Image (tube, helix red, strand yellow):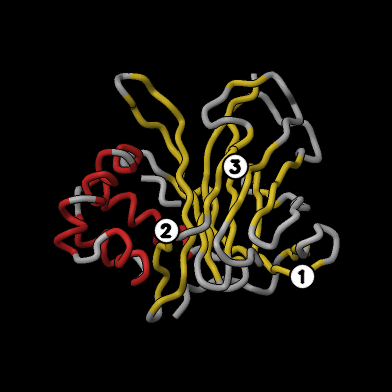
Amino acid sequence: MAVAGCGGGDDSAGTTTAIPGPTGTAPARTVRTSATPAPGETLLRFVKAAGRGDAATMWSLLTPATQASIGPTLAGFRGGAAREFSAGLGTLAPQAKVILSQRVGRWGVAAVAGERSVKGKAEYFAYGAALQPELGAWRLELGGVIISGLEPEPLARIDEERPTVGAGIGAAAELDEIALWVDGERLPATPATDSPFTAKLAEQPAQALEPGRHEVVVFGGTIDTASASAWTFTVE
């Protein structure tokens, strides 16, 4: 399933990004990001629960809004979405490691990656999610922000040292928080947009990427909901 009190962390060091307004030129607000471990720990717990087929634990780690959309009860979740998570995301559980754990404004962003086997073939897979502080803890928000057009394509093998990296982001409400990371490093993304509800990220790493596997994470959030996607590619 791709549906695209707060944990601790040091908020003293971070980066900021200006988010353009509807014309793509005037900044609407500045978004601060900072490293914090709790979102990543929560996502890893969710992945491990998916690997065990533990629907109750997965359910407890979802925001109420997400529960309502993919449940709406634990029984409904157990018979539907939980099985999909176990069959898909659960295959990552044995090797999953946190590759990103950040706070972006009021949201958390986390991603995990690791080796898994699909139809007998090994692949290095990544999964990302947005999180929201709920009742003293972080919960996964598998929300209504759509992230598509991933570049490079997931699992692609390319021969470019400085490839274009990014995605399209769309929502039913105004996007006010957007971020992009490559190998855990925040790129100073400048989204192109002609609408407050959409943005296109297309950036290049400042330096050439080494041959081997690389990880991308994209995040988009509105005042009410958020999503994140993570994927991998290989530079040959």
Q: Name the outermost residue toward the right.
A: 25
- Would residue 212 appear left or right of 70 to someone viewing this image? right
Q: Residue at x 69, y 47 (%)?
A: 200
- Would residue 90 appear left or right of 147 to someone viewing this image? left
Q: Which structural element holds mark 3? A: strand
Distance between the alpha carbons at the discs numbered 1 and 2: 25 Å
- Relative to 216, does residue 186 appear above or below in the rendering? below
Residue 171 location (% of width, % of height): 56, 59
Residue type at tag 2: Leu
Q: Residue at x 35, y 45 (%)?
A: 1
Q: Which structural element holds mark 2? A: loop
Q: Residue at x 46, y 64 (%)?
A: 131
Residue 157 appears in the picture as rendered: yes
Between disc 3 and disc 2, the foreground one is: 2
Residue 5 location (% of width, % of height): 44, 80
Residue type at tag 1: Ala
Q: Residues within 10 Å of mark 3 (few under 14, many from 20)?
A: many
- Relative to 216, does residue 224 appear above or below in the rendering? below
Q: Residues within 10 Å of mark 1 (few under 14, many from 20)?
A: some
Residue type at tag 3: Val
Residue 69 location (% of width, % of height): 33, 62
Pointer 3 or 1: first along the chain: 1
Front residue of 171 and 134: 171
Q: Which residue is mark 3?
A: 216
Check if mark 3's residue and mark 1's residue have beta carbons within 8 Å. no
Front residue of 170 and 236: 170
- Relative to 75, does residue 206 appear above or below in the rendering? above
Q: Residues within 10 Å of mark 2 (few under 14, many from 20)?
A: many
Q: Which residue is mark 1?
A: 28
Q: Which residue is mark 2?
A: 142
- Relative to 112, does residue 209 appear above or below in the rendering? above
Front residue of 55 and 73: 73
